Image: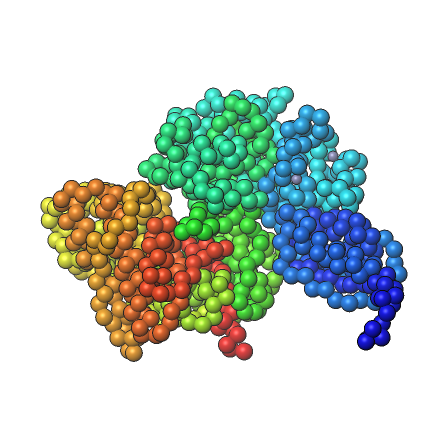
């Protein structure tokens, strides 16, 4: 032996105990990590301890080297299902000679554990117990374990321990306590652990608010649903309004009472097999349906699937999802229940109702009865919505199951609050490389919305112990949220940074992919306030994280009637056709958009004089205008409806060569004068096709090709001017699957490297993440 050791020495060395410190970061608290580690350490015959730490869990293990190595390998391979390991850092430690493995309380490490896991769908083990007549939790609507159950929505403050949750008022019975205390039990430290003897109860309540005594409230609720009644059912993040999705009358009545006419309703079904009967699901969509977040997945509807036509009127997609709470599983355990409409119990874009009293008051005029329970919901959280776009998962609405999981930034941020947008608000708190986005809060136009915002901000600040030093808000001076942000910052003496809407969109996509060098950003969107005071939304930006230049934009057109033109797409059609040189008072245009002569005369005068007709470069508005002309969509019931229908009608159309085109009007990059992308040729082609009687699906498909091609050509010019070959795409229009695919394919054919959102929404729900990235870059530069 050249190094002086003999095989005997080596053997002796291998038998010598070693000790290692192991720091595991990621989602490792409240997800059954400690019992798993306890089991692995015990099985490998190792001594030591595990405890929760500020950044994750700290483990120390002691034993023979081979066993320690086996333990470390198994730690990754056998981590519990809801955990996510971001990093494992192993360090040497001095051998102490201790025996046995312990789980230590958080305080022993002298640090508070932070973080609350996201709510997770009932796990297979719990589901088996729920339906097993021999189990002590048979049909118990609140069973859960460390691998599943409510988390975020039942927690008041950190640390995530039972006394800080709405389970505090339910002391555990001896059987539950024994499970809770046993490190080898699936319910070890499962904070919401409960059973028939000690936990929350379900009750049936009539429309007028009085409890109805029945043997089994669940079966009674099912009977009422099957009789066509509207039931308000308390879930995990709020109440749902539910009706039998196969009952046309019931669906219609729900719409009338909720004042929600066009917007599609989500449908819950028993399992994947049932979902396949409603929709043609891709493998990616099936995978999304089964994730612990159990989002609503927008998928292609099958013909004659038995679902009432009014559930998703005029659209080829259906929002479908699977039960995620034991109470929901019990509804579907009844063979008679096929599909239930489950829609957030609120009036449109108001916060979802969570409190029993609040529900009685707000839903009394809508629901025929309530299926309630006495476990309080502490954080409102809607269902999340996802879609598979261009082959990848995309967040349409970020809420239950995703909150409060964080996302990474490519650079360090000081503690900051990013306000997000005005509509469909999601705000964010950032510190270091982590950004914690709130749940979907709805619109901040009114005081109810702002109250929900303040309540959620307060909770998230406490949860992550983040005291913002800087507040980031949208550039728009008139938003209620901007006013509030400035005032809040002033009171606390904090710095303020304003970020342009479309810059934030692209910066979000850049940050998600760790891009810090300039990119060509396509920000294709509905509405955002521009640096020139006009309404932007069809933007080609040369983007850095800390700033941008505007390389090209859709040519400005008037929005006659301002925000009224968003609700009434026929006005946008007038704006576009007027800008394209058509006589909007002509009989042909009048009949195209179904407008009356007198209303058009007024509009025309407004546009000519520039009265109440702000200029916009929004791509969303171009889609609205096209939908008004091609589909006769005069008024919309919900945001982006016209654009969604334009995409929907073309769903089965093949792509064809560009039949219409956009005209690029040269700018001067050196003088920072943008290229203008002009839609006039699209209108000429489209109207000609209508004249010759071409089918509307085909026209809609041609329209998509022309729009994509126009922006691809603008990106090519941007590359010529700047030599940048990377394109980041963002904005609400990226929810359009056809447009996203055509853009990506077109850009790749031109040799670009294309980046799209993966974990952050391309819509305004992702805005706060992008704002945080911009602010972090600006602040890093200042220091
Ligand atoms: Zn479970
Ligand atoms: Zn119990
Ligand atoms: Zn936007």
> In this picture, is 481 found above or below 666?
above
Residue 286, percent from left and from top: 49, 41
Q: In screen coordinates, is 625 left or right of 113?
A: left
Name the one closer to the observer, 750 or 466: 750
Q: Residue at x 23, y 65 (%)?
A: 664
Residue 491, percent from left and from top: 54, 65
Farthest left residue in view: 587
Quadrant showing the C terminus: bottom right
Q: Residue at x 44, y 29 (%)?
A: 245
> In this picture, is 305 found above or below 79?
above
Task: Count all numbered tags in the image, as a single digit.
Answer: 0
Residue 181, percent from left and from top: 79, 43
Q: Residue at x 53, y 56 (%)?
A: 437
Residue 74, percent from left and from top: 71, 53
Determine the image quadrant of residue 5. Answer: bottom right
Name the one closer to the observer, 327 or 61: 61
Quadrant showing the N terminus: bottom right
Name the one closer to the observer, 205 or 521: 521
Q: In screen coordinates, is 285 left or right of 564?
A: right
Q: In screen coordinates, is 480 left or right of 681?
A: right
Q: Residue at x 74, y 44 (%)?
A: 188
Determine the image quadrant of residue 150. Answer: top right
């Amino acid at each position: 032996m050249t190094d002086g050791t003999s095989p005997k020495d080596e053997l002796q060395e291998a038998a010598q105990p070693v000790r290692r410190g192991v720091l595991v970061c990621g989602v490792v608290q409240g997800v059954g990590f400690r019992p798993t580690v306890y089991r692995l350490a015990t099985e490998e015959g190792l001594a030591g301890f595990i405890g929760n730490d500020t950044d994750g869990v700290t483990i120390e293990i002691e034993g023979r080297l081979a066993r320690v190595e086996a333990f470390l390998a198994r730690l990754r391979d056998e981590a519990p299902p809801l955990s996510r390991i971001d990093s494992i850092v192993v360090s040497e430690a001095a051998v102490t000679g201790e025996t046995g493995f312990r789980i230590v309380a958080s305080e022993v490490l002298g640090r508070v554990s932070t973080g609350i896991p996201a709510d997770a769908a009932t796990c297979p083990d719990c589901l088996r117990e729920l339906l097993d007549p021999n189990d002590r939790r048979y049909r118990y609507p609140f069973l859960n374990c460390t691998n599943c159950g409510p988390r975020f929505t039942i927690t008041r403050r950190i640390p995530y321990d039972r006394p800080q949750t709405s389970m505090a008022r339910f002391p555990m019975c001896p059987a539950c306590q024994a499970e809770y205390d046993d490190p080898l039990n699936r319910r070890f430290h499962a904070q919401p652990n409960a059973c028939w003897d000690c936990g929350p109860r379900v009750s049936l309540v009539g429309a007028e608010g009085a409890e109805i005594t029945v043997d089994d409230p669940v079966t009674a609720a099912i009977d009422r649903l099957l009789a066509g009644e509207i039931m308000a059912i308390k879930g995990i993040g709020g109440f749902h309004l539910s009706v039998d999705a196969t009952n046309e009358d019931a669906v219609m009545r729900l719409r009338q009472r909720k004042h929600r006419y066009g917007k599609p309703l989500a449908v819950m079904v028993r399992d994947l097999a049932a979902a396949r009967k409603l929709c043609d699901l891709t493998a990616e969509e099936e995978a999304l349906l089964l994730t612990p977040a159990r989002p609503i997945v927008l998928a292609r509807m099958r013909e004659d699937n038995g679902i009432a036509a009014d559930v998703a009127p005029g659209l080829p997609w259906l929002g479908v999802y699977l039960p995620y709470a034991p109470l929901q599983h019990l509804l579907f355990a009844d063979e008679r229940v096929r599909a239930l409409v489950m829609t957030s119990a609120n009036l449109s874009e108001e916060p979802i109702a969570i409190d029993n009293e609040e529900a009685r008051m707000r839903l009394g005029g809508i629901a025929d009865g309530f299926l309630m329970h006495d476990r309080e919901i502490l954080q409102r959280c809607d269902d999340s919505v996802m879609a598979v776009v261009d082959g990848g998962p995309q967040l349409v609405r970020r809420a239950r199951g995703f909150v409060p999981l964080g996302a990474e930034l490519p650079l360090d941020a000081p503690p900051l609050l990013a306000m997000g947008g005005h509509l469909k608000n999601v705000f964010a708190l950032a510190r270091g490389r982590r950004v914690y986005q709130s749940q979907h809060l709805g619109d901040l136009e009114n005081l109810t919305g702002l109250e929900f915002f303040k309540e959620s901000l307060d909770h998230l600040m406490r949860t992550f112990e983040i005291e913002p030093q800087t507040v980031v808000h949208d550039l728009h001076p008139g938003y209620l949220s901007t006013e509030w942000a400035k005032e809040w910052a002033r009171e606390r003496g904090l710095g303020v940074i304003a970020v342009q809407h479309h810059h934030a969109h692209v910066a979000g996509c850049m940050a998600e992919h760790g891009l810090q060098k300039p990119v060509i950003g396509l920000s294709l969107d509905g509405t955002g306030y521009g640096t020139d005071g006009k309404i932007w939304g069809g933007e080609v930006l040369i983007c850095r994280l800390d700033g941008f230049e505007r390389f090209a934009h859709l040519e400005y057109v008037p929005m006659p009637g301002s925000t009224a033109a968003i609700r009434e797409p026929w006005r946008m059609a007038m704006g576009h056709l007027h800008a394209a040189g058509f006589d909007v008072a002509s009989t042909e245009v009048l009949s195209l958009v179904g407008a009356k002569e007198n209303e058009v005369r007024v509009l025309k005068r407004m546009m000519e004089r520039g009265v109440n007709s702000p200029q916009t470069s929004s791509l969303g508005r171009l889609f609205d205008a096209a939908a008004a002309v091609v589909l006769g969509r005069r008024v919309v019931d919900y945001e982006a409806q016209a654009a969604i229908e334009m995409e929907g009608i073309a769903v089965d159309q093949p792509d064809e060569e560009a039949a219409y085109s956009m005209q690029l009007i040269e700018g001067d990059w050196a003088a920072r004068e943008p290229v203008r992308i002009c839609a006039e040729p699209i209108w000429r082609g489209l109207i000609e096709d209508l004249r010759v009687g071409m089918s509307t699906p085909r026209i809609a498909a041609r329209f998509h090709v022309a729009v994509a091609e126009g922006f691809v050509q603008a990106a090519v010019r941007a590359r010529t001017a700047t030599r940048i070959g990377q394109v980041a795409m963002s904005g609400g229009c990226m929810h359009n699957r056809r447009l996203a695919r055509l853009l990506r394919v077109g850009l790749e054919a031109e040799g670009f490297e294309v980046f799209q959102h993966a974990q952050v929404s391309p819509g305004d729900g992702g805005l706060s993440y992008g704002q945080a990235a911009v602010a972090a870059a600006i602040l890093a530069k200042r220091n």
